[in-house]
Image (cartoon, helix red, strand yellow):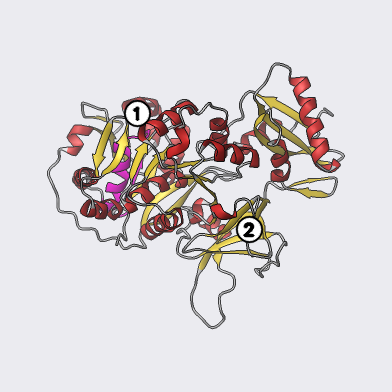
Amino acid sequence: MATHVHQLISQSAIKTPKAPALILKDLQLSYEELDEYIHSIAYGYKNLDITRHDRIGIYLHKTIENVACMFASSLADAVFVPINPVLKPAQVNHIVNDCEIKLLITNKGRFKALLPILSQLPSLTHIILTDGDTSETIEGINVISWSTFTQTPKKEISTINTANDMAAILYTSGSTGKPKGVVLSHSNIVLGAKSVALYLNNDSEDKILAVLPLSFDYGLSQLTTSFLVGASCVLLDYLLPNDVLKAIDKHKITGLAAVPPLWSQLCKLNWKNNVGTSIRYFTNSGGALSTTNLKQLRILMPNALPYLMYGLTEAFRSTFLAPEEIDNRIGSMGKAIPNAEVLVVRPDGSECEPHEAGELVHKGPLVSLGYWNAAEKTAERFKPAPQVPTGIMLNEIAVYSGDSVKKDDDGFLYFVARQDEMMKTSGYRISPMEIEEVLYQHELITEAATLGIPHSDLGQAIIAVVCCTQLDDPIAIEKLILKHCQKELANYMVPKKIIILADLPHNANGKIDRNQLHLTYKTYFSSDK
C-alpha cells in the first residue's frame, strides 16, 4: 500500500503496467511508462545534487513533464512546489524566495518573462527548460535543456523520507497579505487520495478530467485519486469552456471536478450529442454551487452523481454531501470525509449546539504541517485540538478554518460565511451567501458576489456585483434584479447597489476574486453615491 506520493504511480505500475495513466491530447503514457519517466527525472535531480527536503519549483502549464516532475520529487526525497502558470514574475518571485526554491522547472516563454528578476532569486542554482535545446549560465544560474537533464547517468535512489516528512508546498491566497505556503506531508496527500477515492467510488475504469490548476489542492487531487486506483487522468488546459465539452466527448470522461465559476460557464453552453452521458460523477468545491446551476448540471449530466464538497488547503478536504442527500439537505456541505473529524466550536473551544453558528475546526491525519516560514500565522490557524480527553498526551493539532458554519439536528453542516467576510448593516450580521443564493435564482445572472462596503449611516452597505447574460441595457437589468431581490429578501438584506460587469475577476484557482472586488469598490459610498 502506498505511503509516499510517488508510490501512487509505482504501485499502479506493478498492478496494471499497460493501463493508460496520463492522457494529453493524442499523447498517452501507461503506468509503466510514467513510472520509468519519473525515475529518469529523479536521476536528473540527483545529478544536480538535489538533496532531502530541497524545494523544486514547477512553473508549467498542464503537461506530462509537469506531472512527472512533481512525483519524481517525492522519489528523490525533495519537495515539489507547483506554481500556477498564470502567475506573473512578481508573484513567482515571492514564492521562490519565500520557500527558497533551489531548482525551477519551466519553459522558454515563462523563463523569458523571469529574466529581469533572476538576480533577485538567490536560492536558485538551476533552471530546467522543458522546451530548451541549449544549456548556459545566466546570472550565476545554470540553465539546462530538458534533453541534457533527462539523459544523465543513473544514480542509486533510496528514499529515506518517512510518510510524515514534507512532500509538497502549495501556495494559497488568504484574505490579507501575500500567499502562504501550506506544507503537506506524504501522508496528507496519500491519505487524502484514499479518502476521496473511497466516497467517490473511484476505480481503474474511471477517466478523470483535470481542468483545474495543479497548484490548487483540488486540482492536484484529480491526479492523486486517479493514480491511487489505476484510473486514467486526462490533462486539459482549456481556453474556452467549450474545450471542456470537447474533451468530455473525445475521452468519454467519467469524473469531472470544477469550481462554481466554471460550472456557471458550462451551464450556458449547448451540450450537443448527449456529451454528458458518460459522466458518472461530478464534484464541486471552492465555493457554494447555486441551486440553479446544480439543477441544470443534473439535467446536462443525467447519469452523474453530484458531490458537493468543502475543503481548505490546510486540511486538504473536510466534508462532502452524499448524492442521496442532495434533495433532502439543500444548501448543506455534508459531513466529514473519511479519515477526518469536523467540529463546530465557540471561541472558548466548546462545541456548538445544533443551529448555533460557530467556527469549523478540522482534526485528524489530513491536517497539514502548517505554513512554510510563517510561525506566527501557523500559530493563529493551527492550534491544539478541542475535546482532547484529559490525562491523555495526544498533543493533537487541529486547523481552525476561519469559516462560520452550523449543523442541523442530524449533524449535517451548513456554511454561514467566512468570518472575515460577514457583513454588518443596520446592526444585522449577514452572510454574503444568503444574498448570492437569491441572486443566482435570477435567470440573467451567471456569477455574483456581494460585498459589505463602509457606509456612514449603515455601517456597511451591501453591493452586489454580477455578471449577466445580457448587457445591452444595464439600467433596466439593474432594476429587474433589484425588484427580484426586494421580492425574495428582507429589506435590510437588499443590495443598495447592483453593479453589472461583463466579467467578474477571478484568482489563479478560478474562484471569484473577492479581495480584488473589495479593493475596487471599498470607497464606493465615500462620496455619498
Whole-percent x and y of residue 368? 46, 58
Distance of label 2 from label 1 (alpha carbons): 45 Å
In the rendering, at what x and y percent does residue 169 appear? 41, 49
- Quadrant where the N terminus is found in the figure: bottom left
Residue most extreme to the bottom: 391
> Is 301 located above or below residue 361 in the figure?
above
> Residue 293 sits in which quadrant?
top right
Q: Are marks 2 and 1 in contact (CB under 8 Å)?
A: no
Which of disc 1 and disc 2 is earlier in sequence? 1
Mark 2 closeness class: few <14, some 14–19, many ≥20 residues within 10 Å = many
Stretch in magenta: 51-75
Q: Which mark is residue 413?
A: 2
The amino acid type found where label 1 is placed reads Phe
Which of the two discs, 2 and 1, sits closer to the camera?
Answer: 2
Element assignment for label 2: strand
**x and y, in percent, of residue 10 in the image:** 24, 53
- Residue 93 visible, this orientation: no
Instruction: Using the image, determine if residue 325 lies above or below residue 124.
Output: below
Answer whether residue 74 is magenta in the image.
yes
| 180 sits left or right of 518 in the view | left
Q: Specify the amino acid type for callout 2.
A: Leu
Q: Residue at x 29, y 37 (%)?
A: 65
- Closer to the camera in the image, 122 or 321: 321
What residue would you read off at disc 1?
Answer: 111
At numbered mark 1, what does the secondary structure look like: helix, strand or loop?
Answer: helix
Magenta residue check for 240: no
